[in-house]
Amino acid sequence: MDIANNRALPKWIWHRERHQQRSLTLTAHLNADAPIEGAVFRVALTGAAVVRWNGDIVGRIVESPAAAAAFASVAGFPASIPAGRHTLSVEIVAKDDYPIADVNAYLHARTVGFIGFVEGEGLWLPSGEDWLADGERADVVALLGEEPFGDLESSPDWFVRGGYGDIVATPLEDSTVPERFGVDASPAGAGAWRFGGTLAGSGGAPLEDPVPERLELFYHLRKQNEWTLRRAAQQRLDLAALPQATVDLEREHNARILLVNEGTSALTVLWNGAESMQELERYDGCITEWFSAAPGESLHTLPQGMRFVRLFFLGEAGAAFAASVRFEAVQVALKQTGSFASDATRLPLVYDVSAHTSRICHQIGLWDGIKRDRLNWTFDLYMAARSCYFLWDDTAVIRRALRELGEGTPHGKWMNGICEYTLWWIQAVAEYVFYTGDRAFALEMSEPLRRHAGWVFENTDETTGRLSPEGSILIEWVPLTAEERASGLQAIYGMTLSALGRLSADLPALGIGQLPPRPLTNEEEFMRPDNRLAVKALGISAGMVGEERARAFLSSYELRDPVTPLSAYQFAECCSRYGMHDRAYGIIEQVWGGMLDRGATTFWETYTDSYAGGDYHDALTTYESYGSYRISLCHSWSSTPVKWISETVLGVTCLSPGFAAVRFEPTAVGGIARCSGTVHTPRGTIAVSWRRETGGELTGEIHVPEGVEVVVAGVAARVRRGGESLEAQSERSGSR
């Protein structure tokens, strides 16, 4: 990939007035010291355009949703540019813009845009803020890859690094080919396979690319619509006689394909990608793409979320073909500094799969899952971030996702159109500051914090203190009654007020001011016998259910369908809150171990305990708005066991912002006799090891960076700081 030259990537730009300015002229100047050969100008945009070079018209672009989905070459742009000063201008008139709904209201300033680049021998001119818009400095609308524009077709392969420049593509070395027909397959190294054989023709009707009918809310909605149309076209073909192969990447990834046609005939490859073989066979909306390569030509796909890839090779009947096909994983380059190992239980595997799920969801934003929606969904982000603080050396993706949601969502709008998502965002900012100690970021977010908190307070009843919003309330992904939703909302609101109070006390400069009292509630509204688990767990988490009632429920409840990893994890944390760690471990084993039993390589959006064989996609569907294959088998909110394992089993709990103080209190759950691991902190890595002695007592060691205070409980431990052995302090008050 051509990344070593460190070229700046093009940006989506427009006039500073954004969609209020539907017609504008973008201008860039070029001073060529010497003649330039091989010049091309490639663009994508909303609207129609007239392209001028030194005042002469060299191209016209018709307004079309397709023009915003791919880079297109301006056919009349001069391939040879003489030395001297030149002016490029793009005169744009936009009638349509990207639609904005409640779910993507934070993108309201990104409804129009232009992106492009001029490339030639020694020339690179990308669109950016140094261009002019009607004579003024152009305004950056979005970075490459950001919603609603997303990835663009016909991009150079090195554009994979994304607008923030931190995404990398690495070969997937462990793929296998479990199925093939009419094709020879052999590993070619560096994540590649070499396929060859004899083509059997086109399979029937010609393949025609679908044309987008409209601008969509976000990238993956556009792709899903395209794939559905392509899949229908695929099903009209006679595929049975075509050379074909199925590739198993062994784990799910956000992956892309790079193909080199090594034969002497033109080659068309139709391919499907899916999270499971069942999805590959049955889902009408499964990834369906095709591309054609001339002899010697190299092509690549945009990255998509998948584990299994099926390739069909098409071309002139009877012609020989040979192709190298390489598979690459695409995600932000993160160093994993958190780890976990033990002598018993499947917890190390749960930890590993959780970490993998978190890693591959680190993209332009911290995606909920790599299979579909690439919006920043606030609750997904909040849950996903909870494992990140223990795992990774960098939290930049969390910051940019929080910033995008906070700054972008206007006053009077709930984030993603869901009331409690605004509450989760406030909690997510508070947790980010607590685990990272990054108070500067909180101060950057002071205006959004005041704005969104103010909107919450505007919707709070002055008499009862209860939040009573108009619009959607989504507490869990299982069906809930209106009463359950209202009760769950009050619990989340109470938790939010507590988090906001702690944050405001730590940083009075935020200017949050006096907080309203917690909402008036009673135990019974949470603990009614028919209430779903999520409502009960939220009530306990918020402290709105007393200890006696909470303990009675937690000690007797048996997890049952419908359930998701959201409420299952909340239940496990509630158990550990009251010292019932073996109960919590049982939930982790039941749900996350249950996913492993069903072959999970990433953890899922939802879960069913009653799966008895057959199509588990249907069994997993607990949300009434989703068809069965819409459910994601990679969902970052299911990476949360990392937090529980790090805090409860390793025993490292953060007590003050930035891990300035920690408690070391491990627990031997599930028969563990020996355990070791590391926890990431902004001050450096904490290393832990412990063992259970013959009499049951725990002995161990914790090694912390300089400046970290350690409180020890429940273990005879040696504390090391920079190699020095210190006396362990006993448990004291003031822990979080």
Image (spheres, rainbow, N blue to C red):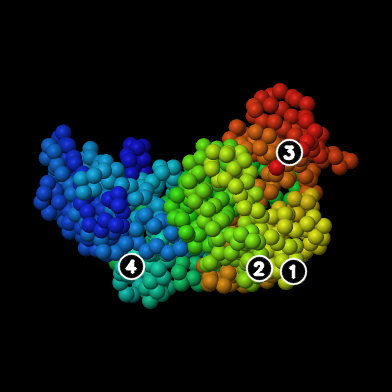
What residue sits right under mark 1 in the picture?
528
- Dot 4 or dot 1, earlier in sequence: 4
Disc 1 residue type (three-letter): Arg
* Of labels 4 and 1, the one closer to you: 1
How far apart are the alpha carbons under marks 4 and 1?
47 Å
How far apart are the alpha carbons under marks 2 and 3?
34 Å
Disc 3 residue type (three-letter): Gly
The answer to which quarter of the image holds residue 622 is bottom right
* Of labels 3 and 4, the one closer to you: 3
What residue sits right under mark 2 in the picture?
484
Q: Is residue 692 left or right of residue 600?
A: right
Please tell me which residue is depicted at 75% across the width and 62% down the height of the picture.
Answer: 523
Looking at the rendered image, the quarter that the C terminus falls into is: top right
* Of labels 2 and 4, the one closer to you: 2
Is disc 2 placed on a helix, strand or loop?
helix
How far apart are the alpha carbons under marks 3 and 4?
56 Å
Q: Is residue 256 left or right of residue 11?
A: right
How far apart are the alpha carbons under marks 2 and 1?
9 Å
Please tell me which residue is depicted at 32% across the width and 39% down the height of the picture.
Answer: 7
Is disc 1 placed on a helix, strand or loop?
loop
Q: Residue 525: x, y in percent?
A: 72, 66
Q: Residue 643: x, y in percent?
A: 65, 47
Q: Residue 45: x, y in percent?
A: 28, 56
Position of 68 relative to 233 (above/below)? above
Looking at the rendered image, the quarter that the N terminus falls into is: top left
What residue sits right under mark 4 in the picture?
214
Is disc 3 placed on a helix, strand or loop?
loop
Disc 4 residue type (three-letter): Arg
What residue sits right under mark 3 in the picture?
734
Is residue 225 among the parts visible in the rendering? yes
Q: Is residue 191 left or right of residue 658?
A: left
Disc 2 residue type (three-letter): Glu
